[in-house]
Amino acid sequence: MDTQAAARKPSIDVPQMLGQKLMLDLRYYCEEPVAPGKCRTPMTSLPPELARLLTDYQIGGVILFAENVQQPGQIIQLTSQLQAVAAAQGNGLPMFIGIDQEGGRVARLPRQQSTSFSGNMAVGATYAAHGSHFASSVGEVLAKELLSLGINVNFAPTVDVNVNPLNPVINVRSFGEDAQIVAKLGGAMTAAMQQQGMLVSLKHFPGHGDTHVDSHHGLPRVDHSAEQIAQSDLLPFAEIIKSANPAMIMTAHIQFPALDSSVFVSKDGEEMLKPATLSRNILHGVLREQMGYQGLIVTDALDMAGISQFFTVPQAVIETFAAGADIALMPVKLQSPAELKNLGLLLDELTAAVASGKLDLQELNASYQRIVKAKQQLTTLAEPKLASALTTLASKEHRAAELALARAAVTVVAGEQSLPLQLAGKKTVLLMPDTSKGVVLRQYLQQLAPQSGELTIISLQQLNLDLAKQQIAAADQVIAAFISPMQSLAEIGGMDDLASITNLGEAYKKQQQYFYQLLQYGAALKKDQTFISLRSPYEISLYAPLVQRSLATYAYHSWQQADGSLVSPIYLALAEVLLGKRQATGTLPVTLVPLASEQSKH
């Protein structure tokens, strides 16, 4: 054997290296035969046949969803089973166990058992008064809680710069519209998480902030100039690579013609621009060579329509590996015994691509070594123990940090001089997205103002329009809250939720029309009206002409305690500001622009 060939020979065989480059989704698993895509049984414990498969193919990682993580003891058992699989592989490498725990709407751990905070835009709203304090505080708590359960990769923070008010998928997942501030807050959160030993994945490179298409549904395109991309989209990634050296960076399924105008032919024979996930110019040229990034490049989920609509599974994985990605996330469904063969078939095709030279062997070896290096950082992590997890999760200190962020984020956008509201001896209508949100806000208003008069809840989900108009006509004032835009697939879970989100979309449009109509009705009757944006603050400009004051909270969740009571730091913080118990210090992290209402379109 010649010495040059020996020098080129990798220290581990090709299929093993390829197995380490896959990160699988085990959200659902059905033991019984089921049609592809129809399994909805949460996988809460690793079935023996899946354990064997992950061992045999040397699989490097998994991503968990809300369905997988239901109770602390169960989560620790599952992550321990996954690490036992890694140990059985005999390569000395732990398993990457990832999750999307961004905070705010994208939080997979059960809220009543963990600390989920108000999300990135709420953190952005605190920047003027508090700098990067809350970014660090949130990062530290999220990392401590995940690590206590054996989860070692967090697909966060989102460092997209949200410059598009109509962005359906990022909006409040972004810290805001100022790239420099996004870089500072994203860097602080990254550093805080990694200080605890958590592997962090920035997302979505080279930037998802100016899209009006959700890449779960299609293939977005960003037509920014190269200069604009450098100053806005890329800037947070560039700064955080320098300041915090993130373990991973996640790709975006987005076309960026100014960075790569080359084309591919889709599985249907259509010629199209390459999205970033499959672009060597972007992943290797921009991220590796221009920006000097040495860590792991992980794809966004490969089952999203932005990729799966145009590629077969093997094609997508081969193309993204050839482009420079180290890890393919969610490349193949393994939801029933009949689908388990798909993993072997995929690895056979990947191995053949290496043999044919389509995938470069030296690059494969270099990618594998990057994975090994990242995994060596995990070997020092303590093994999760239930007693320790129970004292960490939603501890008194963590809940205090969550409430502190909610309070610091509340923003009075207009009408500050007309606060506080007087409830005593008045009839107040709470026009809310659903009953539970009305109940929890009413509860805090009554606690803080015992003489609160009559508080009536109108739920947009169980709406009788005529009755609602009568209640508004009889009221002295209206406190109206809405959530815009509607939830995206990323927030609910992923592509498996496509059917349910289509139905939600229809209901959402109707609710928005009725909400606008009822606020118009109240304005015509000269009622005193308050608007609260419970999510993306861009909607404030739409309702501002109909109300005396507008506020933003950037989040809206609550949870139920064991005794059945509802708890929410967000509604408590909001009630305190409405009633003058606390001064609002939040500032808008985005610029409001005029928006057309659904009502005006009809």
Image (cartoon, rainbow, N blue to C red):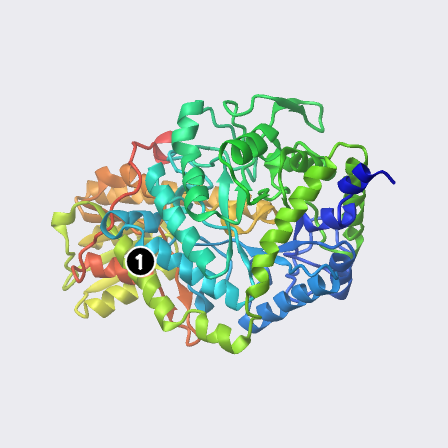
Quarter holding the N terminus? top right
Instruction: State the image quarter where residue 564 is shown.
Output: bottom left
Residue 573 vs residue 41: left or right?
left
Nearest the eye: 211 or 552: 211
Q: Dot 1 surroundings within 10 Å: few (below 14), some, or many (20 or more)?
A: many
In this view of the protein, can residue 147 be seen by the observer? yes
Residue found at the very far front of the displayed protein? 3
Q: Is residue 104 visible to the viewer in this orientation of the structure? A: no
Task: Report the number of numbered marks.
Answer: 1
Q: Which of the 4 image quarters holds residue 513?
A: top left
Q: Position of residue 528 (x, y in %)?
A: 17, 49
Amino acid on which disc 1 is placed: Ala
| Residue at position x 24%, y 60% in the image | 575
Residue 322 screen position, x and y as percent? 67, 34
Q: Position of residue 206 (x, y in %)?
A: 49, 35
Asked if 34 appears above or below 602 in the picture, the reply is below
Q: Could you say which quadrant of the image residue 270 lies in?
A: top right
Is residue 197 depicted above or below 161 in this figure?
Answer: below
Which residue is rendered at x = 56% and y = 37% of the image?
217
Q: Quadrant of the C terminus?
A: top left
Q: Position of residue 125 (x, y in %)?
A: 29, 48
For the point 57% across and 60% down, the residue is: 378
Report which residue position mark 1 lands on: 406
Q: Is residue 275 above or below residue 103?
A: above
